[in-house]
Amino acid sequence: MKKIGFLSFGHWTPSPRSQTRSAADALLQSIDLAVAAEELGADGAFFRVHHFARQLSSPFPLLAAVGARTRRIEIGTAVIDMRYENPLYMAEDAGAADLIAGGRLQLGISRGSPEQVIEGWRYFGYQPAEGESDADMGRRHAQVLLEVLRGEGFAQPNPRPMFPNPPGLLRTEPHSTGLRERIWWGAGSNATAAWAGKLGMHLQSSTLKNDESGEPFHIQQAAQIRAFRSAWKEAGHAREPRVSVSRSIFALVNDQDRAYFGGDGSEADQIGFIDEKTRAIFGRSYAAEPDVLIEQLREDQAISEADTLLLTVPNQLGVTYNAHVIEAVLTHVAPALGWR
């Protein structure tokens, strides 16, 4: 069995060819797709966060709204760039969203990836400390968040407060018990995957990672997952670790599918650079008739290693079509692979 959810970047553009032409469209359609996915039997609704872009950027109002409209599916991010975040304010927002959702939040965070503007986190009021890189700053923010989410008091109370305080040091409120155990780290390298495992964060691995061996993407990603699990075990965490991988998967079951994805030409990994120094490998997309697709996916070692699969959806094609994409995988692919 495998949990299967969707991952949306929430793109929007005023182009007449897009069914998602405004920020309002992106947000409201995201909620509707989460509701539809739950009705189809999917297990999760996840959203990517990008700043300074026509994409989803403020996750907590969206997560709270999805939580209020659904009852069962996991709700999460993949991922929030921690270089932009105030960890204490984030703990309050995340706690509120998790309480609204009844404890279903699965919060994916990361040190971030290249953004739309140069050092965009500076516009949000953050800068690395002396001797820190921006990646170090993102990881530092993450560790503060993890500490705050433990729910222990740390702030000295005012001796003459406006309202009575409980005894002792104060914590951020609202606090959602258990959220600390549902934080995931989006890792780009084997080393950061191991770091996440050591700290007791679950692992989110995307459709790209640092090219560390020259091997095919899915083999490198499977090695990354094993490094994470080894670090988790060595740290002695009592909980079971979880791992998600993201994939673009399209079962071609009708003419519309074939028109959109029948010849997308992305059946091989690609190599690129995510910054001046980091060579990255980008995983292939999968688009084929169900019987062919099943055999292709059977060979993907990283999917086999993961307990959760996030289907990246082309959200600008609209809620109805994206619900069809999810349903086609759940119906025509997942059972044959033992995922259902």
Image (cartoon, rainbow, N blue to C red):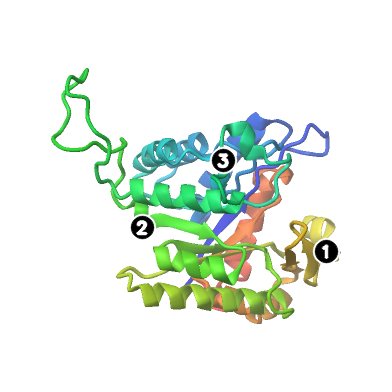
Q: Give the Cα distance between marks 3 and 2.
A: 22 Å
Nearest to N terminus: mark 3 or mark 2: 3
- The residue positioned farthest toward the front in the image shown: 130
Q: Nearer the viewer, residue 290 or 202?
A: 202
Comparing labels 3 and 2, the label whose residue is closer to the camera:
3
Nearest to N terminus: mark 2 or mark 1: 2
Percent position of residue 200, x then y: 39, 64
Q: Give the Cα distance between marks 1 and 3.
A: 39 Å
Residue at image x 74%, y 79%? Answer: 214
Q: Amino acid at mark 2?
A: Glu
Crowdedness of circle 3 by 10 Å Cα count: few (<14), some, many (20+)? many
Q: Is residue 209 above or below residue 10?
A: below
Percent position of residue 267, x then y: 80, 71
The disc at residue 224 is: none
The disc at residue 181 is: 2
Percent position of residue 178, x then y: 31, 53
Q: Secondary structure at mark 3?
A: helix
Crowdedness of circle 1 by 10 Å Cα count: few (<14), some, many (20+)? some
The residue that label 1 is drawn on is 262
- Left or right: residue 26 versus residue 43 is right
The residue that label 3 is drawn on is 84
